[in-house]
């Protein structure tokens, strides 16, 4: 039987892509049967993005808009959208059309077959720089080896989640959210759908290398304690080298003429130990910083505007779940 579907689309300065995204997405959803809703989450865009979504709402009662008071980031925007969904199946996709709407029927087929999480895995990345492709290739495989849960490679946020999974994600209080890791952490039966990722339709990518690196670091720190163990291993390694140096100094002092300049050897040892200490402090700082963010208990986001919902959205901040269905 037809089921209700919610589609969450985080957007930031996507005015060039929104009209075609809306046309293609509604064409696919209308052919699936059942009810649906499209929730655009505007991450404080500076262009006409929120204005275009409001035009969609005037013509289509199944479109919703959540607007942030400032830019809170992509993962928080996805989280906000999940908080306000009501569909039995929830699809997360980006607004740049690199996540093709035409893939939705295949995701739904896997969901109807009993899988709680269906993620889209990229087999090709259209017209992306070689450096970015190499970084993504290495990162996903490194994370898969280091993470304490099984992480699928080459899969982004494009996925379909069962209502049960969405409720579990909404109940998680953590702030540094790496959603593609959280959906793996919850477990249940999961399936993949492969696709060739097309090039961006228009505009510039919003995920710069710096933002991608920050997201990668969030994923690594959130789902692996190996960096902390690395600091311990560096300490043992440094201590082992120190013992070797003590033995060499004794040998050179009593049996040979020392081949090393005293000041140079001392300076090299000091710089090496200092580097190890700084690396260790940096690793600890990443984890302590996340603890600090958690205990402040500030809201994840602040809503400036919410339109298209059947009943007024409360003027709340943070995780504000809604019972409004599609």
Image (cartoon, grey):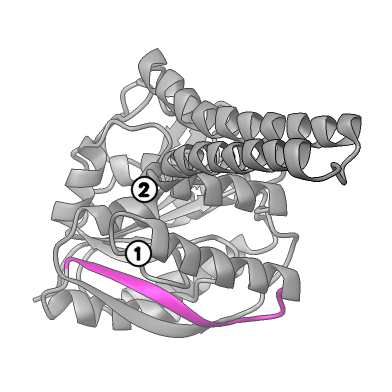
**Residue 89 lies in what quarter of the image?**
bottom left
Q: Where 212 sits versus 298, above or below?
A: below
Q: Secondary structure at mark 1?
A: loop
Q: Closer to the camera, 82 or 6? A: 82
Is residue 63 visible in the rendered image? The answer is no
Describe residue 281's horizontal placement relative to residue 167 as left or right.
right
Q: Where is mark 2, residue-wise?
A: 223
Q: Secondary structure at mark 2?
A: helix
- Label 1 close to label 2 by CB (< 8 Å): yes
Left or right: residue 39 versus residue 110 is right
Q: Residue at x 75, y 34 (%)?
A: 269
**Residue 285 part of the magenta-drawn span:** no
Instruction: First in sequence, mark 1 or 2: give its number.
Output: 1
- Residue 204: percent from left, percent from top: 75, 60
Q: Is residue 117 one of those drawn in magenta?
A: yes
Percent across and percent down for residue 252 are: 76, 42
Q: CA distance from mark 1 to mark 2?
A: 10 Å
- Which segment is the magenta one? 116-128
Which quadrant of the rendered structure holds the N terminus? bottom left
Image coordinates of residue 306 in percent, x first then y, are 42, 34
Residue placed farthest to the top in the image? 296
Which residue is tagged 1? 151
Q: Is residue 141 above or below residue 185?
A: below
Residue 278: which disc?
none
């Amino acid at each position: 039987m037809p089921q209700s579907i919610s589609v969450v689309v985080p957007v930031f300065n996507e005015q060039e892509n929104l009209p075609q995204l809306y046309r293609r997405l509604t064409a696919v959803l209308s052919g699936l049967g059942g009810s649906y809703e499209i929730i655009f989450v505007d991450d404080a865009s500076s262009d006409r993005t929120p204005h275009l979504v409001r035009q969609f709402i005037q013509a289509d009662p199944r479109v919703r808009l959540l607007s942030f008071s400032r830019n809170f980031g992509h993962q928080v925007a996805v989280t906000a959208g999940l908080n306000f969904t009501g569909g039995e199946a929830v699809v997360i996709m980006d607004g740049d059309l690199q996540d093709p709407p035409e893939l939705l029927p295949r995701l739904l087929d896997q969901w109807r077959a009993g899988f709680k999480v269906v993620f889209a895995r990229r087999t090709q990345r259209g017209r992306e720089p070689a450096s970015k492709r190499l970084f993504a290739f290495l990162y996903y495989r490194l994370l898969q080896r280091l993470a304490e849960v099984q992480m699928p490679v080459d899969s982004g946020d494009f996925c379909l989640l069962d209502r049960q999974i969405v409720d579990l994600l909404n109940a998680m209080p953590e702030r540094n959210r790496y959603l593609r890791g959280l959906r793996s952490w919850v477990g249940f039966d999961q399936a993949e759908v492969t696709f060739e990722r097309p090039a961006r339709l228009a505009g510039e990518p919003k995920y710069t290398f710096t933002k991608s690196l920050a997201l990668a670091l969030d994923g690594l720190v959130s789902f692996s304690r190996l960096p902390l163990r690395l600091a311990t291993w560096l300490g043992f390694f440094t201590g082992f080298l120190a013992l070797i140096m003590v033995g060499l100094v004794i040998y050179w002092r009593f049996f040979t003429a020392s081949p090393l300049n005293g000041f140079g050897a001392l300076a090299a040892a000091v710089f090496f130990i200092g580097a190890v200490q700084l690396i260790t402090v940096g690793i600890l700082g990443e984890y302590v910083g996340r603890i600090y963010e958690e205990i402040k208990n500030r809201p994840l986001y602040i809503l400036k505007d919410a339109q298209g919902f059947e009943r007024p959205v409360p003027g709340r901040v943070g995780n504000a779940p809604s019972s409004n269905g599609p």
